[in-house]
């Protein structure tokens, strides 16, 4: 899912995509991702994943964000996915092309002092990035439709300015969005997020998460209006509806003995496709 992204390579939308087909071969493709700098030396050294209560999201600075966005742009694995639609499906290959373009066009744009940056990491691999900007008055929208859509609300709490996700770990972007809702709530605000999609894929994905169009250029999410998509977990934090309260994380070698490891029976593709 991408916020600011120009161009759309294929006439493929989320509505027309066979997501179940991708789920069927997801586990094999996910296991082959290069999540560490070195290849495992034996079968016992293969990446191990655990279920954790907090997603492996870290605040990062501007320079780190731009460096990681550059990696998305030039990542050989993403390039290979983009160039092999028969192996990964046309939809996933298109997603790879789009994320590379988004990283190139918007990964190093000028940001305000209110910009914040986050990364979602699996081991040594950054699989998603998020850049947010501060909120503003909804009076700045092109028309007044927002008054009917969000009665009593007048202020956007934060802006999803750019989101990049590895094409095989797409829902890591959704988890970053979940993280932003929690962050706004912790600051004492009822979250109201703005998204600025520039292609049909991004717009459809945003709508699936509860964003609604307020004008030709902007979509806004009030999670309280979509109990089928957003709920609160046992800690009172915003949570994607019908999703587990645990997140996939890579286990370091020294942690394996004391960690509940995700078995092959865990449908982690639900979190990542």
Image: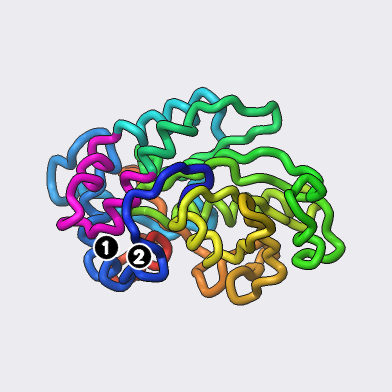
Q: Identify the residue at the far right of this view.
A: 152
Residue highlighted by disc 2: 269
Residue 147 image point, x, y percent = 81, 62
Name the disc covering residue 26, or none: 1
Q: SS class of the residue under badge 2?
A: helix
Residue at image coords 83%, 66%: 151
Relative placement, left or right, of 105 versus 167 is right
Q: Is residue 244 above or below residue 182?
A: below
- Can you see residue 246? yes
Residue 152 image point, x, y percent = 86, 63
Relative placement, left or right, of 264 versus 224 is left
Within the magenta stretch, is there residue 86? Answer: yes
Q: Main secondary structure of the magenta part?
A: helix
Q: Nearer the viewer, residue 67 or 53?
A: 67
Residue at image coords 35%, 65%: 269
Q: Is residue 227 above or below residue 124?
A: below
- Range of residues picked out in magenta: 75-98
Residue at image coords 65%, 72%: 226
Q: Quadrant of residue 253?
A: top left
């Amino acid at each position: 899912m991408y916020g600011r992204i120009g161009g759309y390579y294929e006439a493929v939308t989320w509505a027309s995509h066979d997501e179940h087909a991708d789920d069927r071969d997801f586990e094999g493709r996910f296991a082959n991702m290069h999540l560490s700098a070195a290849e495992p030396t034996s079968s016992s050294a293969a990446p191990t994943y655990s279920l954790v209560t907090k997603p492996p999201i870290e605040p990062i600075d501007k320079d780190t964000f731009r460096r990681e966005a550059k990696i998305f742009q030039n990542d050989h694995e993403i390039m290979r996915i983009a160039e092999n639609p028969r192996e990964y499906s046309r939809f996933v290959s298109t997603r790879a092309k789009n994320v590379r373009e988004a990283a190139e066009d918007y990964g190093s744009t000028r940001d305000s002092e209110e910009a914040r940056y986050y990364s979602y990491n699996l081991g040594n691999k950054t699989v998603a990035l998020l850049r947010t900007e501060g909120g503003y008055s909804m009076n700045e929208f092109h028309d007044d439709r927002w008054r009917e859509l969000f009665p009593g609300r007048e202020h956007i709490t934060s802006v999803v300015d750019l989101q990049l996700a590895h094409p095989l770990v797409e829902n890591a972007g959704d988890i970053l969005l979940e993280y932003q809702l929690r962050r706004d709530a912790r600051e004492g605000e009822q979250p109201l997020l703005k998204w600025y999609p520039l292609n049909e894929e991004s717009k459809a994905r945003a709508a699936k998460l509860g964003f609604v169009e307020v004008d030709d250029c902007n979509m806004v999410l009030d999670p309280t209006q979509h109990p089928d998509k957003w709920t609160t977990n046992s800690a009172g934090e915003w949570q994607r509806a019908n999703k587990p309260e645990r997140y996939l994380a890579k286990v370091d070698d020294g942690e394996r003995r004391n960690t509940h490891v995700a078995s092959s029976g865990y449908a982690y593709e639900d979190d990542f496709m």
